[in-house]
Amino acid sequence: MNITPIRNENDYQQALVRLELIFDAKRGTDQGDELEVLSILIDRYENENFPIGMPDPIEAIKFRMEQLGMKQKDLAEVVGFKSRVSEILSKKRKLTLGMIRKLNTTLHIPTEVLIQDYK
């Protein structure tokens, strides 16, 4: 096992090729250990060089509603009137702190997603 830090795109591509070769390695073997360490290095490189931003708060709500099979009337039970839900989902009304707390508790959407500014 000759693992080195991933410092550039070439190192990254080589690491991906090697990862693919040893992908089915068994835990506790030399290749299994190499797979684990290489995966950590690749993950770190990707997080530093290809960061994924947080989703738009309203899109996160819509996505979570879809996952849970919720309709606007179901969300009205969380944030208030059906008309308010419509205004929120069309971005005509901003989320209040109380709404953010309820959405976090009920839909399990992280508060750091919900508190972001949006247009």
Image: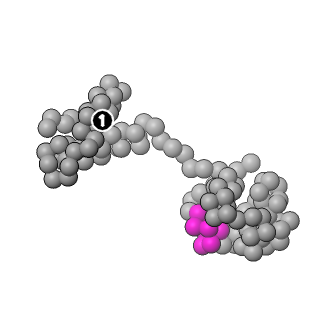
- Residue 1 in the image: x percent, y percent? 14, 38
Q: What amino acid does circle 1 point to?
A: Glu
Please tell me whether residue 68 is drawn above or below residue 32 in the rendered image: below
Residue neighbourhood size for the residue with mark 1, other residues' Cα within 10 Å, grouped as few (<14), some (14–19), many (≥20): few
Residue extending furthest toward the right:
83
Please tell me whether residue 31 is drawn above or below residue 81 in the rendered image: above
Residue visible at 73% across and 68% down in the picture = 75
Would you say residue 107 sits in the magenta stretch?
Answer: yes
Would you say residue 64 sits in the magenta stretch?
Answer: no
Residue extending furthest toward the top:
10
Q: Is residue 5 visible?
A: no
- Residue 79 in the image: x percent, y percent? 74, 71
Residue visible at 14% across and 48% down in the picture = 29
Residue visible at 30% across and 44% down in the picture = 39
- Residue 66 in the image: x percent, y percent? 66, 58
Residue visible at 24% across and 38% down in the picture = 22
Please tell me whether residue 54 is drawn above or below residue 45 in the rendered image: below
Say how the picture is coloured.
one colour
- Residue 86 in the image: x percent, y percent? 82, 60
Question: For residue 102, what is the image quadrant?
Answer: bottom right
Element class at badge 1:
helix
Total marks drawn? Answer: 1
What secondary structure do most residues of the magenta stretch adopt? helix
Span shown in magenta: 103-109
Q: Which of 90 and 67 is in front in this view?
A: 67
Please tell me whether residue 99 is drawn above or below residue 38 in the rendered image: below
Q: What residue does disc 1 label?
A: 20
Q: Which of 76 and 54 is in front in this view?
A: 76
Question: For residue 46, what is the image quadrant?
Answer: top left
Q: Can residue 32 be seen in this view?
A: yes
